[in-house]
Image (spheres, grey):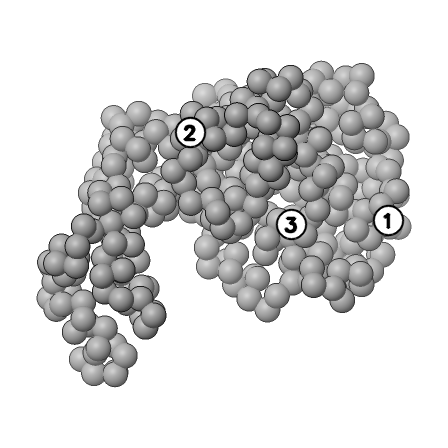
C-alpha cells in the first residue's frame, strides 16, 4: 500500500543491484545488517544475484531502519554519491553504453520499468535546460525518501560519466516532503540551487546532452550483447498473481513455499493474499504448482542438472516426490520427458 492508502494492484519489485550499495555501506559502518534484513523479511530472499528482485517495500523498510538506527537522514545521498552507475548490473551497462548523454538519459527513461517496477524517470525540456524528473508510482512507507535521494544522486553520477566528475547540477528540484527533509543540507547534493517543485528532478544545460559516452562504450563497462534480453526476459510483473508467482520462486528451494512467508514478504496479511488471488480465480497452491511446472520445464533442458538436483531446486524432498508431481502434470516421468525433448522424439 502507498502512503495515501492507494493499492498498486501488484507488488512493486526492484533489482537487487539497487540494494547492494546500501547493504555494503551499512556493513562498513557496523550497522546491524543481518538483523535488519531479517526484520524486513529480506534475509530469505535470493539477492546474491544483481538481477534478482526484492519487494521494494521491504527494501525501503531496510534502508529507513538503517537510517534511523545510525542517525543518517541523508543516507540515500551518501550511498548514491559513492555508487557507480556501472554497478547497477545490466541496466547500468546498457545506459553507459549509449552513444551520447542524451541517448543515455532517454534509455534510462525507457527501460527503468525493467529495473524498478514502481519508478518513473522522464525528461522535460524547459528553454535551454532539461529536467530529468523522477517519481515513484507508489510511496511505500517512509523509505521512499531515501530511494528518491539515491535516484537523484545516481542520475548526477550518470551525467558526470559524460560531463566530467566535477560537473555540478544547475538546479536540483525536490518535491515538498524531500525539500523539507534536506533543507539546509545542500552540500549533500552539491547543487548550485535547490528548489521546491511538484516532482524531483536534476536540471542540466541542454547543450551538454550531445556529449559522447565514448569512455564507457570502449571499456569493460559497456553493455554486453545479452543485457537487454536479460532485462526484458525477466521484467518484473505488474499484476498481483504475477507478483505472487515471482515471490514464490524465491522460496522454491523450501519443500513447500509457505503461504505465510510469501504474504509476509509482500507486506500483506494471509487473508488479504488469499482474497486478492480469489478475485483472479486463483489460489496460492495453484500459483505454486504453475511456478514449479514452469521451472521444471526450464531446468529439464539443462543437461548439467541431474533429476535429483532439479527435484531439490523445486522444493521436493526427493526424486520420487518430483516424479509423481511431474507425471500428474504431463503423464510421463521427468526422465522420459527429458530424453524425448533432447532427442526430438515424442
Question: Is 220 above or below relative to 142?
Answer: below
Element type at mark 3: helix
Q: Is residue 217 left or right of residue 37?
A: right
- Residue that carries the numbered disc 3 in the rendered image: 87
What is the x, y in percent for residue 40? Answer: 44, 27
> Are the residues at dot 3 and dot 2 in contact (C-beta closer than 8 Å)?
no
Q: CA distance from mark 1 to mark 2?
A: 40 Å
Q: Residue at x 52, y 25 (%)?
A: 32
Determine the CA span between mark 3 and mark 2: 25 Å
- Residue 114 or 215: which is nearer the viewer? 215
Q: Is residue 106 positioned above or below 177 on the image?
A: below
Closer to the chain start, of discs 1 and 3, is: 3
Front residue of 134/224: it is 224
Give the SS element for disc 2.
helix
Q: Is residue 129 left or right of residue 84?
A: right
Q: Which mark is residue 246?
A: none
Please state if 272 lies on the left or on the right of 101 as rendered: left
- The residue carrying mark 2 is 38
Q: Where is residue 250 shown, x and y percent of the image?
A: 36, 45
10 Å crowding of disc 2: few (<14), some (14-19), many (20+): few
- Total labels drawn: 3
Question: Which mark identifies residue 164?
Answer: 1
Point out the tag, 3 or 2, that comes first from the N-terminus: 2
Residue 270 in which image quadrant = top left
Q: Residue at x 86, y 38 (%)?
A: 168
Image vertical order of residue 307 relative to residue 115, above or below: below
Residue 210 in sight: yes
Residue at 79% over, 20% down: 185
Measured as percent of width and height from the top left, residue 288 is found at: 24, 46
Q: Mark 1 vs mark 3: give the one in front.
A: 3
Amino acid at each position: 500500500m502507498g502512503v495515501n492508502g492507494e493499492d498498486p494492484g501488484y507488488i512493486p519489485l526492484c533489482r537487487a543491484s539497487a540494494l547492494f550499495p546500501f547493504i555494503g555501506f551499512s556493513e562498513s559502518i557496523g550497522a546491524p545488517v543481518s538483523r535488519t534484513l531479517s526484520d524486513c523479511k529480506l534475509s530469505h530472499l535470493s539477492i546474491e544475484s544483481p538481477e534478482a528482485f526484492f519487494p521494494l517495500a521491504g527494501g525501503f523498510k531496510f534502508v529507513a531502519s538503517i537510517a534511523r538506527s545510525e542517525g543518517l537522514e541523508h543516507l540515500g545521498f551518501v550511498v548514491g554519491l559513492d555508487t557507480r552507475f556501472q554497478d547497477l548490473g545490466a541496466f547500468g551497462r546498457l545506459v553507459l553504453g549509449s552513444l551520447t548523454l542524451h541517448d543515455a538519459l532517454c534509455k534510462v527513461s525507457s527501460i527503468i520499468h525493467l529495473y524498478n517496477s514502481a519508478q518513473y524517470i522522464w525528461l522535460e525540456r524547459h528553454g535551454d535546460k532539461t529536467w530529468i524528473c523522477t517519481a515513484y508510482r507508489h510511496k511505500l512507507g517512509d523509505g521512499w525518501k531515501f530511494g528518491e535521494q539515491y535516484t537523484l544522486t545516481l542520475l548526477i553520477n550518470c551525467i558526470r560519466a559524460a560531463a566530467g566528475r566535477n560537473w555540478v547540477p544547475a538546479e536540483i528540484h525536490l518535491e515538498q516532503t524531500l525539500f523539507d527533509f534536506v533543507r539546509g543540507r545542500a552540500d549533500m547534493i552539491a547543487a548550485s540551487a535547490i528548489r521546491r517543485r511538484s516532482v524531483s528532478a536534476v536540471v542540466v544545460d541542454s547543450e551538454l546532452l550531445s556529449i559522447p559516452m565514448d569512455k564507457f562504450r570502449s571499456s569493460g563497462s559497456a553493455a554486453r550483447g545479452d543485457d537487454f534480453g536479460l532485462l526484458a526476459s525477466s521484467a518484473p510483473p505488474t499484476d498481483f498473481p504475477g507478483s505472487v508467482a515471482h515471490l514464490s520462486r524465491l522460496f522454491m528451494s523450501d519443500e513447500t513455499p509457505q503461504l505465510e512467508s510469501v504474504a509476509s514478504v509482500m507486506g500483506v496479511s494471509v487473508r488479504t493474499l488469499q482474497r486478492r488471488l480469489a478475485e483472479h480465480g486463483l489460489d496460492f497452491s495453484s500459483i505454486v504448482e504453475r511456478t514449479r511446472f514452469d521451472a521444471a520445464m526450464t531446468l529439464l533442458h539443462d543437461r548439467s542438472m541431474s533429476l535429483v538436483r532439479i527435484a531439490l531446486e523445486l522444493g521436493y524432498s526427493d526424486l520420487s516426490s518430483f516424479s509423481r508431481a511431474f507425471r500428474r502434470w504431463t503423464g510421463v516421468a521427468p526422465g522420459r520427458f527429458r530424453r524425448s525433448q533432447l532427442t526430438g522424439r515424442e
